[in-house]
Amino acid sequence: MTILLVMAKAPVPGAVKTRLCPPATPAQATRIAVAALRDTLDVVAATPGVTPVLALAGRFADAEDGADLAAAVAGWPVLPQRGEDFATRLVHAHADVAAAHRGRPVLQIGMDTPQLTSAGLAAAVRRLGAAGTDAVLGRAADGGWWALGLRDPRHASALRGVPMSTPATGRLTWAALAARGLRVGALPVLRDVDGWADALAVAGLVSGGRFAREVAAIRCSLVPGGRR
């Protein structure tokens, strides 16, 4: 059974989704982060045939709606993220899962793509399990990536030295995996939520979710006479 690993940051005001400010306030950006994470956790929980694991930076005890978030992952293994930079934290998270779940493939996602569906994640798991595939990579529209799947998660060590959050991150990650001789398969390109334009575009894809409702509330607050 595949491990579905979620890399997430505890939604602490002032520490998450800061690129949404402005037009969002820090408090509103935090609410968006909470909503994106909750939507993601719900989709993961609804995905059949996987074992969910959360790698968390920070503590839910310090986060907005921390009790609700903790309840959403009740029964999940929760690992602390380790490392000074994101690439190192990714490497450690995959290694920790490899040590705890020997021989299991890992599909890793983040909390910036609340438009994900359980059907889409199940398809990614199948792609990772296909003959002739050692890894899968889902590139993001901004040049990064939103998902990394590895038959052997120890190969995440290839990420060391790959710059994260740049327009070249996806290309360089693919090259680093291929340089190890891994046969890499492509997942669909998705838009992740960094800035306000991203939030608007993604909210339009998930009109019924928590994320879309929080974005709509901010849009309303920006209209003269709207709710603040």
Image (tube, rainbow, N blue to C red):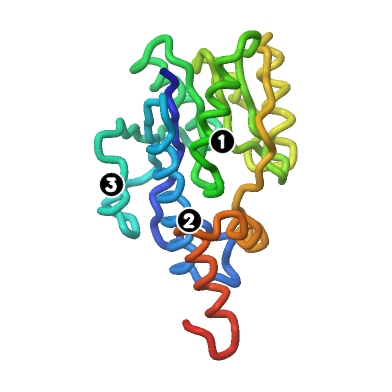
Residue type indicated by callout 3: Ala
Secondary structure of residue under mark 3:
helix
In this picture, residue 122 sits left or right of residue 48: right
Mark 2 sits on what residue?
Answer: 16
Q: Mark 2 and mark 3: span between their CA atoms?
A: 18 Å
Residue 107 place in picture, x, y as percent: 51, 26
Marks 3 and 1 sit apart, C-alpha to C-alpha, by 25 Å
* Neighbour tally class for label 1: few under 14, some 14-19, many 20 plus, Cα within 10 Å: some
Q: Quadrant of the N terminus?
A: top left
Q: Quadrant of residue 100?
A: top left
Q: Which mark is residue 70?
A: 3
Q: Percent from the top left, x then y, of residue 101? A: 36, 16
The residue depicted at 48 percent of the width and 32 percent of the height is: 89
Residue nearest the observer in this picture, 51 or 86: 51
Q: Nearer the viewer, mark 3 or mark 1?
A: 1
Q: Amino acid at mark 1?
A: Gly
**Closer to the observer: label 1 or label 2?**
1
Q: Position of residue 73 (x, y in %)?
A: 31, 41
Q: State how far apart marks 1 and 2 are (Cα).
A: 26 Å
Question: On the picture, is 123 further left or further right than 28?
Answer: right
Disc 2 secondary structure class: loop
Look at mark 1 in the image and give the residue it sits on. 120
Position of residue 91 measured from the top left corner of the image (x, y, whole percent): 50, 25
Which amino acid does the dot numbered 2 rest on?
Answer: Val
